[in-house]
Image: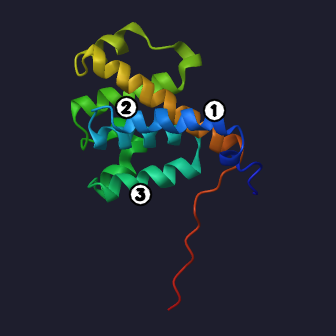
Amino acid sequence: MQQRIKYHGFAPELMKHVYALNKAVDECGLEKSLLHLVKLRASQINGCSFCVDMHSKEAMRDGETQQRVFLVSAWKESPLFSDRERAAFAYTDAVTRIADQGVPEPLWEATRKHFSEEELVKLTVALGMINVWNRLCVSFHVLHPVEQAKAA
């Protein structure tokens, strides 16, 4: 597969704002580990190999364990995540698949038990942002870095 467009060089005025919003999300005050995990989860749902690779590496670089990173895709079956993280994953699943059923009221109420209204706005913007990146990367076939096997 070859990259279709190197989008960074096109629509520079628009991309400047995309980068600015991304920076604002990263500095919004939500836990860095939570942001890494929900970005990873949304990227898994969207099938974005570039973002899955990047957010897995960033999460581990910032202290997440390899096991927790590997189990994000099976979060419902793993006891490794806190109630707050589990609520964030369920919300991430619904927001990322928004066309399926929106955010059902029971899920909304469950999520509100773990996040303030301000945090919900920040989390929702963070999910919107990662979904923008996923759509750019998947649409334009942006490939994750391929690490060459080390010679023996």
| Residue receiving disc 3 | 57
Quick one: SS at disc 3? helix
Q: Nearer the viewer, mark 2 or mark 1?
A: 1
Q: For this view, does 65 lie left or right of residue 39?
A: left
Disc 2 secondary structure class: helix
The dot on residue 89 is 2
| CA separation in Å, label 3 and label 2 | 19 Å
Image quarter of residue 17: top right
Q: Is residue 89 above or below residue 110?
A: below
Point out the tag, 2 or 1, that comes first from the N-terminus: 1
Looking at the picture, which amino acid does disc 3 mark?
Answer: Lys
126 or 96, which is in the foreground? 126
**Residue at 66% across / 51% down in the picture?**
142
**Identity of the amino acid at label 2?**
Phe
Name the residue furthest top: 105
Alpha carbon of mark 2 to alpha carbon of mark 1: how far?
Answer: 29 Å
Question: Along the polypeptide, which appears first: circle 3 or circle 2?
Answer: 3
What whole-number distance in Å separates the C-alpha atoms at marks 3 and 1? 27 Å
Say which residue label 1 marks.
14
Percent x, y for residue 36? 37, 43
